[in-house]
Amino acid sequence: MTSSPFASIIEHFSDLDDPRAAHRIEYQLEDIVIITLCAVLCGADNWVEVSNYGRSKAQWLKQWIALPNGIPSHDTFEWVFARLKPQQLQQCFLNWTQAIYQLSAGELIAIDGKTLRGAIAPGERRSLIHMVSAWASHNRLVLGQRTVAEKSNEITAIPELLKMLELEGALVSIDAMGCQTAIAETIIEGQGDYVLALKGNQGDLYNDVVQLFDHACQTQFQGIEHDSYQTVEKGHGRIEHRTYWTMGQTDYLLGAERWAQLKSIGCVESCRRQPGHPGTLQRRYYLLSIEGDAQRFADAVRSHWGIENQLHWILDVGFREDELRACRGYSAQNLSVIRHIAANLLQQESTAKCGVKAKRLKAGWDDDYLLKILSAAARVIPSS
């Protein structure tokens, strides 16, 4: 028999604890995970579609997995995923990702959260499930994720996620929610560096940084050691000029001593012009553990926007994540992990020049193309 395209997944997901009593197991847990992954890769978005996919592709699947009792019902898929511990599935995903994908040197890692808007439990008015993900910008990979009950709980989830990652040599960007001294220290302890968005929640420190850049801009940085970098972007009838500045004057900032390895501060000034409308000017501020390198700072800021424009957009448009209603037990969190695995595999397959949604359709129509996608799960992707 040809070597299984699922061997690596089986190896790294074998530590999952089966929530079922041993005497009630008719379908192997690894088979349930594999069928679900294939179904999601091929366009399935809910448990009925997952089960229907399994039935329509049963003969093909039997080339790789035994299936002595056939394909589980949609209720069985949902029941199992509703009871699998999300932390275990997320850890297996992380182990698999780190074993399969080799990151670029000096990788830019963006940490950001996304609410599963469709996963609304009975009696609730909104979803209480929030996924915090780590996104490798250059390699376009989800590195790992953690589930939290509310967006405000990102502060506790981010350090847990960071401790799971290999941060050595990486530059980590986080929005203002994660601008916390403990998070900065966790990154430094992992031998990484940080770019943390700074807002009013940091009080005097924020005010100090704003005043420093206001004064520097008013005097055109005369006599002030700094670095700068500019970009111009055109599109949709708009022209946006961005200027990135870094300054190393952190010694006299109020509370600066509390931030591990704080070496510079950054500012991004965005000026957007559109015909027939007055221009808008906006400034954003950052704390940096890197020396005053404005271009590297700019790359980190843009990579953080990339998690919204790439990962979150892919999940919403390519996987319809915000429309999905699975919320029984842990099923929403666990199905989100499966979507992240599928997103990684689809992103790495580059022969089909189309979007993620079209790739999913093609995989459903063409078993050979599905095997090509799955081949990424059995080899190491070289660094770029």
Image (cartoon, rainbow, N blue to C red):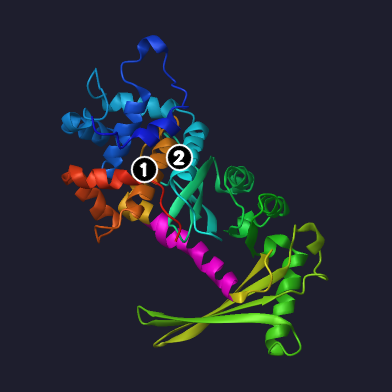
Label total for image? 2
- Determine whether the residue tagged by mark 2 lies in a helix, strand or loop: helix
Magenta-colored stretch includes residue 298: yes
Q: Quadrant of the C terminus?
A: bottom left
Which disc is residue 362 wearing? none
Q: Please give the residue where the numbered disc 2 appears in the rendered image.
A: 96
- Determine whether the residue tagged by mark 1 lies in a helix, strand or loop: helix
Vertical side of 378 occupied by 269: above or below: below
> Magenta segment, which residues?
295-313
Label 2, residues with CA under 10 Å away: few <14, some 14-19, many ≥20: many
Q: Is the Cβ of the residue at disc 1 closer than 8 Å to that at disc 2?
A: yes
Tell which of 206 and 287 is nearer to you. Answer: 287
Which disc is residue 377 wearing? 1
Amino acid tagged 1: Ala
In percent of the image, x 41 and y 28: which residue is there?
Answer: 82
Residue 317, given in percent of the width and then of the height, sits at: 32, 55
In percent of the image, x 34 and y 21: which residue is there?
Answer: 28
